[in-house]
Each structure stands twice: as structure tokens, then as C-alpha cells.
Amino acid sequence: MRYQLAIIGGGPAGYTAAEAAGHAGLSVVIFEKHSLGGVCLNEGCIPTKTLLYSAKTLDSARHAQKYAVKVEGTPEADLPKIVARKQKVVRKLVLGVKAKLTAAGVTMVTGEAFVLDKNHVQCGEAVYECDNLLLCTGSETFIPAIPGVDNVPYWTHRDALDSKELPASLAIIGGGVIGMEFASFFNSLGVEVTVVEMLDEILGGMDKELSALLRAEYAKRGVKFLLKTKVTSLAQSEAGIQVNYDTAEGTGNVVAERLLMSVGRRPVLKGFGLENLPLEKNERGNPQVDAHMQTSLPGVYVCGDLTGFSLLAHTAVREAEVAVHHILGKEDSMSYRAIPGVVYTNPEIAGVGATEESLQKQGIAYRVKQLPMAFSGRFVAENEGVNGVCKLLLAEDDTILGAHLLGNPASEIITLAGMAIELKLTTEQWKRIVFPHPTVGEIFREL
């Protein structure tokens, strides 16, 4: 069996590349050991956002009176039905991915693929020959070697997604994107949540000022935050799982019914024969790729989390497009200038381009333009009694270096700033674009 392109991994990078290559006329085979869609579709991006939307709807019902809407009785969440709806959404989208690949003429193989060399992949007893090889093996949950971790029950994000019973209390180790999204969800459903974070602020990669504002909002809602706190050990007690920690002020502990480990994710580098490819590695130990996503071995490409660069689904999708274009001989290259980052809490927080911290570290001069989201009439109409912030970071020549938002719907309008950054627009050039009125996106024009 010979193919022009063999792809290992059926996540966003893999299925995007497979569909594009198939429609371009290439013979394509894609290997996925679990379900098409990868972590993002099956146990990450989509299922978490499905749960979070249910929580957001619950929050809206609780505060309906702010909008002159009367809701009879006390709004309640039905967790088993929320989880069932999540599973229904995932099934529907997985079938959609499969249908798109079928339409593109892609051969789909379920099973663990193993690289024999750059032109041969084995799956089960069969060996597949290929002209080009694309590795999209994704990432996995990282569990730190905390003393006692093997002796206590804990959730990963996968367990938290499938739980049909609410704990009375939840301790979350890690205040990054995953940790904060689950803190938001369980807080909305009435769970007592404590977030333990080693850094001095949550959401390490986001704008620090806006992250602090989001933290303050959730603190008002009852979420407890332990910052600059190092977890030293875990233990099971009669009261629950005990998280022992050190801070500058001394030692302490928090006890909760459930424990969620969300320290982070790391690329999958083992188990598929990567060692059989003589590839150059970067300083993080991941395969080195060029602007076309090609490795040091011609015909071998790497996209998505395996590069170790972004670990975001939308980055993986664009990388896959670039790789396929290079295989087809089309001019294209990967740019990381404007990769949006979003946290789907309520309110949402989003950023694209540089942060103040990254610019300061690089010694790049910049100035800040900042406005409350209330300068957008649409935001005021839809967010009664809620505050928000829009921040732009400008270079000396007034090109946009970075944009950061706190407030709904940050996830939907951050792309406006991303395009301005990618196209290297100045504020004057961006202002010439006609923004529809009334929209929350007009906040950029106000700035």
C-alpha cells in the first residue's frame, strides 16, 4: 500500500492536512489510535466549551432580573444531562470530521502507527509506504512527581469532563488555562473551589494585569487562590485529599473532596517510532522544523503540539495547511506573529501578539492604549453591571504589537486584532476599516 502522504495523528493538524491533501488530489492515509478529532475534539476544546456554555447559561438565568426578565424558581444545573449533551456534541462533530475525510478520499486507519523509516509506517501487521510523512501526535497531560501523588485519587481534565456527580469541594493544582476553565465551571455549579498556583499570577502566558482582574472577579464569586505556592506533598485524610504546600510565609494545606491536576501538557514524543528518524531537535527536545513545517529530513513534516511551540488547536490547523502547501509546491510559510490565546471563563479573557511582559523582556519600546469595555455601547447593553478592559500595545511607529481583552465576547473579536498584527497595520490604517455598529468589536476603533 503506497500513499503520497501518510499522517500519524487525527487531531486538528492531522485531519486538516488530510482533508486539504485529499482534495488536492494526493493519495492520503491517516492513522489515529483513538477517535478522530484528537484530544481537542474528544476531551479538550469542544467538550470543555460545551460544559462552560451550560454554566454560562446558568449564570445568565441567575442574573436574569438585571435584564428585566423574570425567572420562576431557582435555576439549577442537571450535571448528568450537561455531560450527556457534551457527549452528543462530540459525537456529532467526530462524525462530521469523518464525513469530510471520506469526501476527500482519505484512507482512515484506526490503530497505533509506528514509524519504521521516513517512507514506511506500520500499523498492526500492515506496512504502509509513503512519499511524505506528517507527524501530528499531539500532547498528553503532565503529572508532576509530587510526593504522595501515586497514593491519592485525582482527576485529570478527562475525568472532570465525565464526572456526573458534583463534589462539595475541589482543589485545582495549576492556575493555567485548563485549571481556570474548570474553576469557572465548577464555581458556577456551586462547588467550593481552591486554585493552587506556583507563579505569582494565574494564566502565565496572558496579560498579567487582565489576568489579575479576572482572578479578582472569581475571588468575589468565592474561588480561593493560593499564588506563589508550591505543592510539597499529597495525602489522603478522613476529610478528603490533603494538599500540603509551601509559601514565603510558611507551610499550610488545603483539604478538598476532589483534586484536579492541571499543571500542563507536554508533546507526545515516544511510542510511535520517532527515534527511527534522524531528526535535528530544538532546545526543548522537539523536532526542529523550518517555516514550511518540514524537519531536517526532507519529506518529513511535524505539526501541532509535537513542535512544542504553541499547543493550541488553531495553531496546529494553520501549520497543517502550510505543510500541505509545501508538499504541493505552493508558496506559503508559517507565521507565529499573531496566535490568539483565549480562556473561556465568564467573562472571557483573550490576547494576541506581544504582552507587556514579553516586550519588556526583549527591551522593545511600546506604549499602552487602554479603555474600559463600557466604551462599546453593545457591551453595555449586554453586560449589565459588568466591567471589562481592552488594551492595545503599540510600537513607536503606531503599529499594533499586541491586543488583550477581558470581557465577553473576547473570543469572537480578538481575531480583529490578530489580523491587524499579522498585516502590520498602524492604528491609522486600522481605523480606516468600517466597523459595524453596534458591536463590541468597535472597542478597538474607540482606542
Image: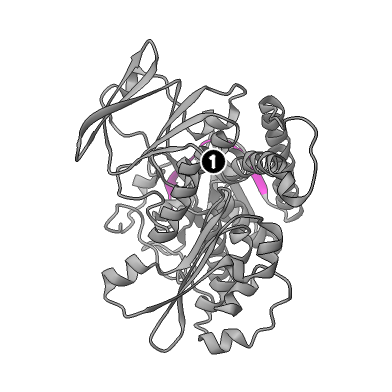
Q: Is residue 217 left or right of residue 376?
A: left
For the residue pair 358 and 366, the one nearer the viewer reads as 366
For the residue pair 87 and 195, the one nearer the viewer reads as 195
For the residue pair 27 and 177, the one nearer the viewer reads as 177
For the C terminus, the quadrant is: bottom right
| Image position of 394 with respect to 163: above or below | below
Q: Is residue 99 left or right of residue 126?
A: right
For the residue pair 215 and 331, the one nearer the viewer reads as 215
Q: Is residue 80 left or right of residue 366?
A: right
Residue 104 pos. (x, y %): 73, 56
* Residue depicted at 75% across the width and 48% down the height: 99
Element carrying mark 1: helix
| Image position of 58 with respect to 344: above or below | above
Q: Is residue 422 visible?
A: yes
Bounds of the magenta span?
A: 107-118
Residue 98 pos. (x, y %): 71, 45
Q: Is residue 1 visible?
A: no
The residue pinned by badge 1 equals 184
Q: Residues within 10 Å of mark 1 (few under 14, many from 20)?
A: many
Residue type marked 1: Ser
Dominant secondary-structure state across the stretch colored magenta: strand
Colour setting: one colour
Residue 58 falls within the magenta-colored stretch = no
> Residue reaching furthest top?
238
Residue 31 lies in what quarter of the image?
top right
* Residue depicted at 49% across the width and 73% down the height: 333
| Image position of 308 with respect to 249: above or below | below
Residue 117 falls within the magenta-colored stretch = yes
* Residue depicted at 32% across the width and 43% down the height: 227
